[in-house]
Image (spheres, rainbow, N blue to C red):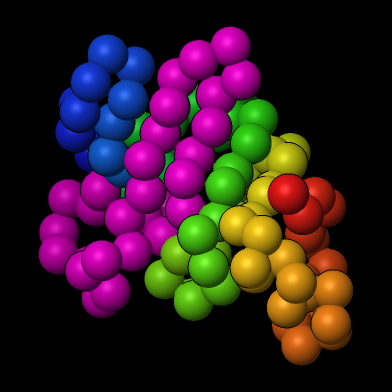
Amino acid sequence: MLIPLAPKVWVVAPEVPPRYPYGNCMYIEADYPTLIDLGAGGLAFSALNQDKVRKAVLSHFHFDHIHGQPFFPQAELSVLLNKSLILMRGIYSFPWLRSVG
């Protein structure tokens, strides 16, 4: 389900209360369509043209913010700087993470 926030900006939310109620995400429709966090789940993501999403920005690595990544295999992934430092130190291993920004 897409809930409009502003022109070309939506909250992507499931129709039913999710297991992790604060793991929703935002979709920004622009020249470079972007998702912020990937925790809304498969049914919520069905409201989007998944092939159109070009970038996903992760706020952090909790499961409720990353588990939707398989729905967007073509999206470039970025994380916040403090999380990228953790990745560089090898604490986490995410083979699908292609871009740390």
Q: Position of residue 85 (x, y in %)?
A: 75, 72
Can the viewer see residue 68 in this picture?
A: no
Q: Position of residue 5 (x, y in %)?
A: 20, 28
Q: Is residue 88 left or right of residue 59?
A: right
Image quadrant in which you'd find residue 90: bottom right
Q: Magenta span: helix, strand or loop, mainly?
A: loop
Residue drawn at (58%, 11%), measured in percent from left and top?
A: 31
Q: How many marks?
A: 0
Q: Quadrant of the N terminus?
A: top left
Judging depth in this view, the residue of 74 and 26 nearest the camera is: 26
Judging depth in this view, the residue of 80 and 28 nearest the camera is: 80
Q: Position of residue 33 (x, y in %)?
A: 55, 24
Q: Is residue 87 left or right of residue 79?
A: right
Residue drawn at (50%, 26%), measured in percent from left and top?
A: 49
Q: Position of residue 96 (x, y in %)?
A: 79, 61
Residue drawn at (66%, 60%), measured in percent from left and top?
A: 81
Residue 80: within the magenta? Answer: no
The segment highlighted magenta reads: 13-42
Residue 13 to residue 34: above or below:
below
Residue 38 to residue 64: above or below:
above
Residue 15: within the magenta? Answer: yes
Residue drawn at (31%, 55%), measured in percent from left and top?
A: 24
Can the viewer see residue 18 in this picture?
A: yes
